[in-house]
């Protein structure tokens, strides 16, 4: 297991390396034209161009430039630049063209909001979805099963913005008027209770959407697993039915759920755009969509990297959990 | 019924007129349709029949592993005098794996792929006895040794995928023997294994039968499998018994045309240079079982009453019960002709 984890860890590091390299190449090497000329202003003199080239580090080798890029991702680069100097953060994240704030700062600020939303929602939907799925599978074709699957169909088909607005309407000033549930984000460090209460509705909306999906998946997997020969063996041993299902059945039916779960979280970190917008959370999703829409290149680069790293990290986590659950993976 | 001439020994299992019918949208599947047999301590009771003849369902029903809601079950399954069909699921659970154990066809699928073999066996120990983990482990190591798994202490920590097919089946047998059961049901235990391994597993089953002094039900679609190890054989067709006899008698003086067909199609019995003759046609759908004798559409000797009257399962003077309308003289003559032809001797 230890060797397996180390292998996956190295693999994840390699992925992050490749992603940063690709980002660097796509955004800083491939675009045609000399960036020095682009950033040197109108009708630049040879001297200005040379100066800008030196300033941007374009005179250095590509590996050196890539190194600078990675260094700036880690330590930040906006502070070194006088406000509004075009191209100063080259090659780095620098500042958003739109908001004129440092992209790295923006990500550090918005990251926790999106992560709070994604992780909280994920835990909720996992617990909800898997429990509903189990009940449904065990009480197949019963009223409870039909209700649960009806709920699942509703959850899968209901658009998030509609659910979100509905929730806001019910709990907001026009409905029950529960202030604690109002939109916006509250720092966890300044007000944990406020953080929680402001996230309850977005979590629930997100969870409703995904729980439905997970319930169906759990139900299907569990029903399939319960038809396996080793389940018959477990029964033939004389194990109580509860143990047959919760220990032997669930273990095997949850492995695909784990994979799905990791990827869903990773993608949500790239942006639960609609939920963030409806509940005015100002997370990464908003940022990603706005910056893409207005061709805000530094912001797009930043969000791309965050998403890529999130995917790499989550697939690492998924692989390790999967290997823990299924020993066959560890040995192959 | 004719007085039982069969195996001497304590009667462990007495199945009486068992019927297991599954209502399905396409019709009622009559998987088992009026089956009676007994199994004794020290006996290996072979059940033979083509695939789909209800062998598995018969035994799964006895163990309570057939969903009672999905099936209409009638008859009696007396196990040491108690009718298993009348037990509640909770009571039956205490019989399963303790007094009545079962191993299955596919050892690759029968063990949980995600738990260590040792842990799966420990679980089997602990479910019916209140022992410490340490004691359970000792018991498991002892069992693994008893079924011929080398270096049990090391293999104990392996996962099923690290075991070969034969080893897995040995582990399954060890699991079944955990609580010194009275009966071991082995459902096609060698079908999924290599020929050489098959022989070893059969030998092991025979060995544990003696060692643990139990009764064994050995299910197979291959007469060759039971030729060496069983004392009694029941031939099944379409959920019914066609013939039930001491093994030697069944091989030497078979009375039912279906048994003749099975013998003719058996490679290990048919001698060198003789032709293998598969039984023509296919087993019937259990939703539309042919009227009268279920085998009549495939029977070369069918005559007047076969398609109308279901032959009783009884001793017609041949020494053991069978279900065929032919007279005992006809049976003897037809078998003699057939046997001679099979062996290539001119009649
Ligand atoms: N739960 C069930 N519902 C409907 N039909 C079933 C069910 N279980 C088994 N059968 C049918 O019963 C018949 C006998 O099956 P089985 O006992 O497994 O045959 P064998 O073990 O002799 O190959 C088959 O036709 C099978 O399709
Ligand atoms: Mg079978």
Image: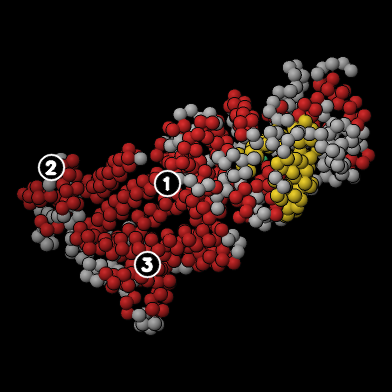
Q: In the rendered image, which residue does mark 3 sit on?
A: A203
Can residue A322 be seen by looking at this rendering? yes
- Marks 1/3 same chain: yes
Give the mark nearer the N terminus: 1 vs 3.
3
Mark 1–mark 3 CB contact (< 8 Å):
no
Q: Which element carries disc 3, helix, strand or loop?
A: helix
Give the mark nearer the N terminus: 3 vs 2.
2
Name the front one of labels 1 and 3.
1
Q: Which element carries disc 2, helix, strand or loop?
A: loop
Q: Nearer the viewer, residue B213 or A168?
A: B213
Give the mark nearer the N terminus: 1 vs 2.
2
Residue at point 73%, 40% (across, down): B11
Alpha carbons under labels 1 and 3: distance apart: 27 Å
Residue at point 20%, 58% (across, down): A104
Alpha carbons under labels 1 and 2: distance apart: 49 Å
Can residue B262 be seen by looking at this rendering? no
Give the image location of residue B39, x and y in percent: 72, 39
Residue B292's tag is none
Give the image location of residue A154, x and y in percent: 50, 67
Residue A60's tag is 2
The residue carrying pointer 3 sits among few (fewer than 14), some (14 to 19) or many (20 or more) residues within 10 Å by Cα, namely many
Q: How many callouts does the rendering have?
A: 3
Q: Nearer the viewer, residue A4 or B7?
A: B7
Q: Is residue A28 left or right of residue A245?
A: left
The residue carrying pointer 2 sits among few (fewer than 14), some (14 to 19) or many (20 or more) residues within 10 Å by Cα, namely few
Q: Quadrant of the C terminus of chain B?
A: top right
């Amino acid at each position: 297991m230890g060797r397996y984890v180390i292998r996956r860890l190295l693999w994840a590091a390699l992925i992050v390396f490749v992603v940063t390299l690709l980002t660097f190449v796509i955004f800083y090497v491939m675009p045609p034209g000399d960036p020095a000329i682009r950033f040197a202003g109108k009708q630049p003199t040879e001297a200005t161009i040379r100066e800008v080239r030196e300033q941007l580090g374009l005179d250095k080798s590509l590996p050196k430039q890539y190194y600078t890029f990675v260094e700036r991702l880690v330590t930040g680069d906006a502070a070194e630049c006088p406000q509004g100097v075009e191209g100063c953060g080259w090659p780095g994240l620098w500042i958003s063209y739109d908001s004129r704030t440092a992209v790295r700062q923006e990500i550090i600020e918005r990251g926790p909001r999106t992560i709070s939303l994604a992780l909280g929602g994920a835990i909720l939907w996992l617990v909800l979805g898997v429990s509903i799925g189990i009940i449904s599978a065990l009480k197949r074709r019963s009223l409870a099963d039909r209700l649960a699957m009806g709920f699942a169909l509703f959850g899968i088909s209901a658009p998030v913005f509609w659910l979100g607005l509905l929730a806001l309407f019910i709990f907001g000033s026009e409905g029950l008027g529960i202030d604690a549930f109002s939109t916006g984000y509250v720092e966890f460090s300044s007000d944990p209770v406020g953080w929680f209460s402001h996230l309850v509705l977005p979590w629930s909306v997100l969870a409703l959407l995904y729980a439905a999906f997970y319930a169906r998946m759990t139900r299907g997997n569990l029903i399939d697993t319960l038809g396996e020969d080793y389940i018959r063996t477990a029964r033939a041993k004389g194990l109580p039915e509860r143990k047959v299902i919760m220990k032997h059945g669930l273990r095997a039916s949850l492995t695909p759920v784990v994979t799905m779960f990791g990827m869903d979280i990773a993608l949500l970190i790239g942006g639960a755009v609609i939920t963030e917008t409806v509940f005015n959370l100002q997370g990464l999703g908003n940022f990603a969509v706005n910056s893409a829409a207005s061709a805000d290149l530094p912001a797009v680069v930043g969000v791309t990297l965050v998403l890529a790293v999130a995917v790499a990290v989550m697939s690492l986590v998924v692989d390790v959990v999967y290997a823990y659950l299924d020993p066959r993976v560890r040995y192959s | 019924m004719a007085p039982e001439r069969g195996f001497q020994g304590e009667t462990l299992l007495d199945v009486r007129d068992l019927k297991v019918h599954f209502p399905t949208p396409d019709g009622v599947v009559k998987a088992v349709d009026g089956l009676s047999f007994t199994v004794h301590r020290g006996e290996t009771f072979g059940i033979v029949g083509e695939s789909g003849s209800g062998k598995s369902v018969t035994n799964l029903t006895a163990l309570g592993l057939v969903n009672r809601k999905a099936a209409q079950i009638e008859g009696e399954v007396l196990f040491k005098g108690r009718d298993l069909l009348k037990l509640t699921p909770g009571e039956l659970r205490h019989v399963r794996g303790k007094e009545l154990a079962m191993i299955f066809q596919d050892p690759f699928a029968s063990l949980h792929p995600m738990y260590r073999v040792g842990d799966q066996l420990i679980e089997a120990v602990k479910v019916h006895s209140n022992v410490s983990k340490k004691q359970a482990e000792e018991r498991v190591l002892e069992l693994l040794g008893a079924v011929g798994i080398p270096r049990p202490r090391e293999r104990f920590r392996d996962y099923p995928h690290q075991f070969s097919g034969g080893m897995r089946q040995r582990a399954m047998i060890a699991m079944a023997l955990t609580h010194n059961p009275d009966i071991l049901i082995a459902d096609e235990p060698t079908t999924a294994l290599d020929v050489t391994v098959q022989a070893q597993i059969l030998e092991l089953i025979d060995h544990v039968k003696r060692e643990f002094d139990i009764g064994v039900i050995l299910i197979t679609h291959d007469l060759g499998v039971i030729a060496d190890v069983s004392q009694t054989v029941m031939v099944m067709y379409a959920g019914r018994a066609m013939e039930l006899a001491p093994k030697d008698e069944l091989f030497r003086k078979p009375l039912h045309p279906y048994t003749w067909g099975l013998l003719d199609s058996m490679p290990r019995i048919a001698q060198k240079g003789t032709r293998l003759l598969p039984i023509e046609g296919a087993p019937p759908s259990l939703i539309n079982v042919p009227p009268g004798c279920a085998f009549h559409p495939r029977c070369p000797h069918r005559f007047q009453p076969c398609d109308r009257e279901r032959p009783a399962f009884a001793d017609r003077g041949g020494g053991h019960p069978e279900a065929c309308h032919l007279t005992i003289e006809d049976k003897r003559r037809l078998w003699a002709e057939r046997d001679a032809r099979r062996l290539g001797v001119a009649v």
